[in-house]
Amino acid sequence: MTDKLKNWLVPPLPETPSPNQLNQWCSSALAALTTTIEATAPRSRPSPRSKAWWTPLLTTLRKAFTKATRKAKKAQTPDSYNIARQSKLGYVKAIKRAKASYRADFLTKTTPHNIWTAKELVAPRKTHRFPSLPDTSDPVAINKSLVDHYFPLKDPLPNRGRLRKNPSATPLTKEEINLPSPSPHPPPPRAPTVFPTPYGKGLTSSTPRSYSNSSPLW
């Protein structure tokens, strides 16, 4: 299809065409393009089994529901909203009736080839995926059962014993008890002390004593 569209030639446009000639040229070019597309493009073939329960009545009801909804959005009156609501209700009920009728008709025509499909139609709904908890009738029992299952109690740790006094060790004196524990890291160097002066700079502990003891210049 792509190659044919690339090779498709647009009909030549007449020089200084009149409005009628221009309309004829557009119609002929569009017709030639439509013919090429219909000859090469594959047509969609929807499966009749996608919505086998669909009926012409549902098509009519859907059109009426769409029309009533658009009128309600445009008018915004209580009557229009009521009509749209009733149209939707009738459309939904008709879909349910059509599905039920299709299932009943399908079950009457069951064959060995579609027995499993019939079983899915008549089987009850799937049960809730939450597992059943035996001997649980109230929320407290359910909570306890879940906690015991996901967080079971562990065995207690074995007794490690207690520290015992060494009979051969000498008792500590008060001086040894009051001694500070040695630090594993040495203390950082102490920064020099700065004293404010009227000269704009501070005197530190490393400043010579002769300078620090000098009298002011004023």
Image: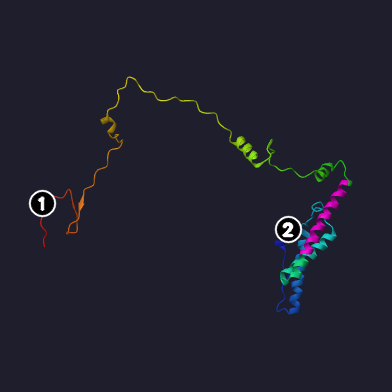
User: Where is 62 relative to 158, above or below?
Assistant: below
Q: Quadrant of residue 41?
A: bottom right
Residue 165, how many percent across, how many down?
36, 23
> Considering depth in this image, is 15 or 88 the residue closer to the camera?
88
Callout 1: 10 Å neighbours few (<14), some, many (20+)?
few
According to the image, label 2 marks what residue?
A: 1
Counting labels gives: 2
Query: Which coloring applies here?
Result: rainbow
Circle 1 SS class: helix
Residue 61, how many percent across, how many down?
81, 62
Callout 2: 10 Å neighbours few (<14), some, many (20+)?
few
What residue type is disc 1 on?
Answer: Ser
Residue 103 within the segment the image draws in magenta: yes
Magenta stretch in the rendered image: 85-107
Q: In the figure, is residue 134 to the left or right of 88? A: left
According to the image, label 1 marks what residue?
A: 210
Circle 2 SS class: loop
Q: In the figure, is residue 96 to the left or right of 174? A: right
Q: Distance between the residues labelled 2 and 1?
A: 105 Å
Q: Quadrant of residue 136?
A: top right
Dominant secondary structure, magenta: helix
User: Where is 157 relative to 97, above or below?
Assistant: above
